Amino acid sequence: MAELQTSAAVGERVGAMREGVTMALYVAVVLLAEAIPLQATSLGGAEVIGTYWGSTIGLALAHVYAFTLSARLFSHGHMERSEWLAAASQLAAAVLVALVATLPFVFLTGDPAFNLSGSLIALLIGATGFESARAGGVPVRRALLIGAAALIVAALVVGVKASLAH
């Protein structure tokens, strides 16, 4: 019986982490797409930070709202512990990405801030691709290629989003 409880607890944590990583990647792609038109403006660091945080909070709240409403739909009107953990993980991941994306604007201005911010977000995306490959037992060299492919796909998604938004 203890084995089943432990297995269920591990399953809850894995599900919550998966939801958190999904949110982190989603926010990362959206912030990268936002950076394209923002970089062409003369906005100061505080305005960029405000824009990034506003977008992150809006995205996170919208996603968690939709997640909890759909969870209730499929859980007979209430949310299970695992779903609460997943929602908390989603919010935490969104905050983490926003912190990573905006920290460069505290210390730098203009293009250097945008470049460092974008590089940090790209590192997060590439590392996720790499780690997902390694978790599947892929050798390091091939995992590096998969991480690079994750970056290429993210760049394509960012390009499509940026071009459709403006």
Image (cartoon, helix red, strand yellow):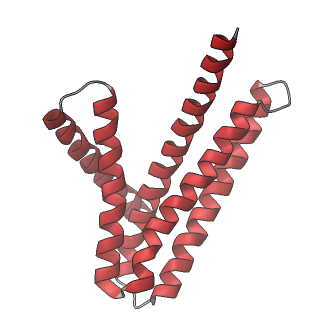
The structure residue drawn at horizontal position 29% and vertical position 65%, both measured from the top left corner, is: 119
The N terminus appears in which quarter of the rendering?
A: top right
Identity of the residue drawn at 53% across and 48% down: 23
* Along the line of sight, the residue nearer the viewer: 124 or 160: 124
Q: Quadrant of residue 5?
A: top right
**Visible residue check, residue 166:** no
Q: Residue furthest right?
A: 77
Horizontal side, residue 29 vs residue 7: left or right = left
Q: Where's residue 12, x and y in %? A: 63, 29
Choose between 46 and 163: the one closer to the eye. Answer: 46
Residue 34 in percent (x, y) is at: 43, 69
Residue 142, placed above or below residue 62: above
Decide: is 47 above or below 26: below
- Horizontally, is 83 left or right of 42 in the view? right
> Does residue 145 lie above or below 39 as drawn?
above
- The quadrant of the picture occupied by the C terminus is bottom left
162 displayed left or right of 84: left
Residue 106 showing in the rendered view: yes
Farthest left residue?
A: 141
Q: Residue at x 86, y 30 (%)?
A: 77
Measured as percent of width and height from the top left, residue 39 is found at 36, 80
Residue drawn where x is 39% and y is 72% of the image: 35
**Can you name the residue that lies furthest to the top here?**
1
